[in-house]
Structures are given as C-alpha cells and as structure tokens.
Amino acid sequence: MINLFDKVVLIEDMLDANLRKGMVGSVVEIYNDGEAYEVEFIDPSGHTYAVETIDASRLLKLIYDPAT
C-alpha cells in the first residue's frame, strides 16, 4: 500500500503531462482507497513542476529501509 507522503516512481511515460518513466514524486493525496494518487513532482531546487492524479498501476513505491 502506498501511503501519504511516500516517495513513488512513475513506471511508464505520461507524455500528455510531460512526465517520463523513472521520475520520482511524493504522494500528497490518496483517492478511492488507493486506486489513484495525487503526486507532486519537485525539481532539485525545490520547485514543483507537476502535480498529477495518477492511477496506482502506474506507480511503484520506493522503499529505503531493508526488509525485516
């Protein structure tokens, strides 16, 4: 399950939104119990360059902690 504020990676291009596979964003809203997410994409300077509603099937949660 992807939670609020998790880092996610886009697993396919969304050319209509000018987003490409591999771009990393943060979840800022969850819709329909995780069917879709509002994801904010920020550049290295801290400026938001996109906020898009994205279907869960197009995202992968990034995990930084080792499995326990």
Image (cartoon, rainbow, N blue to C red):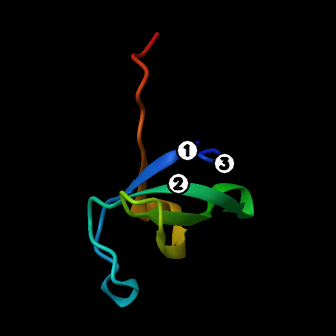
The amino acid type of the residue labelled 1 equals Asp
Direction right: furthest residue: 32
Give whichever of discs 3 and 2 has the lower sequence position: 3
Mark 2 surroundings: few (<14), some (14-19) or many (≥20) residues within 10 A: many
Picture coordinates of residue 7 (x, y %)? 48, 46
Q: Is mark 1 on a helix, strand or loop?
A: loop
- Left/right placement of residue 60 relative to residue 40 reads left
Measure the C-alpha gap from mark 3 to mark 1: 6 Å
Mark 1 surroundings: few (<14), some (14-19) or many (≥20) residues within 10 A: some
Give whichever of discs 2 and 1 has the lower sequence position: 1
Which residue is drawn at the image coordinates 53% and 75% (left, top)? Answer: 52
Residue annotated with mark 2: 26
Residue annotated with mark 1: 6
Q: Is residue 4 above or below residue 48?
A: above
Measure the C-alpha gap from mark 3 to mark 2: 8 Å
Which residue is drawn at the image coordinates 37% and 90% (left, top)? Answer: 16
Label number found at residue 4? 3
